[in-house]
Image: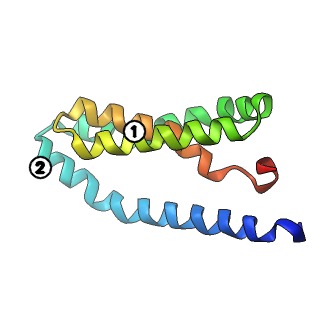
Amino acid sequence: MEENIREYYIMIISGTITMLSGGFVMPIFAPYVRSEFTAPIQLVGLAVSGYFLLRMFSEFPIGVLGDRVGPKVPLVAGRLLSLVGSFICYKTGNIWALIFARVLWGGGGRQLFLHRHELR
């Protein structure tokens, strides 16, 4: 544990910052989507929860995949999915594309929370 304590603290800090920044955005995200996309409240709910829905259902399969192929492949794929999802969120003007982008982003979001021992 002592030899990798720096990496452990980096993972804790990056995970905390990610969750904190996501928490700051959530209270303003739904009203923003509702006003900018003029979407029904059900689609606003899907856009807000799309990230968490896929992330919740992808925890186990991504963990199994990480055990089979090693943690680096899912980690890189997750970062790419998060990058693509966030870019689509930034560029879209369509509520369905926003929902799709949030789901993509959620699929990549699990990788931030790999345990330190998985990164060896």
Q: Is residue 81 above or below residue 31?
A: above
**Horizontally, is 42 left or right of 78 in the view?**
left
- Kindly state the secondary structure of the residue where label 1 is placed: helix
Q: Position of residue 79 (x, y in %)?
A: 53, 44
- Dot 2 alpha-carbon crowd within 10 angstroms: few under 14, some 14 to 19, many 20 or more: few
Q: Earlier in the sequence, mark 1 or mark 2?
A: 2
Q: How is the image coloured?
A: rainbow
Q: Amino acid at mark 1?
A: Val
- Dot 1 alpha-carbon crowd within 10 angstroms: few under 14, some 14 to 19, many 20 or more: some
Q: Which mark is residue 10?
A: none
Q: Amino acid at mark 2?
A: Ser
| Residue placed under numbered mark 1 in the picture | 84
Residue positioned 16% across, 38% down in the render? 93
Q: Nearer the viewer, residue 109 or 25?
A: 109
Q: Quadrant of the N terminus?
A: bottom right
Q: Is residue 27 above or below residue 64?
A: below
Residue positioned 57% across, 36% down in the render? 77
Residue positioned 59% across, 33% down in the render? 58
Residue 46 is drawn in which quadrant? Answer: top left
| Residue placed under numbered mark 2 in the picture | 35
Of the two numbered discs 1 and 2 in the rendering, the one whose residue sits closer to the viewer: 1
Residue positioned 26% across, 60% down in the render? 28
Q: Report how far apart the C-alphas of labels 1 and 2 lie in the structure.
A: 24 Å
**Horizontally, is 100 left or right of 78 in the view?**
left
- Kindly state the secondary structure of the residue where label 2 is placed: helix
**Horizontally, is 106 left or right of 111 in the view?**
left
Q: Position of residue 45 (x, y in %)?
A: 30, 41
**Horizontally, is 58 left or right of 81 in the view?**
right
Residue 37 is drawn in which quadrant? Answer: top left
Q: Position of residue 12 (x, y in %)?
A: 66, 66
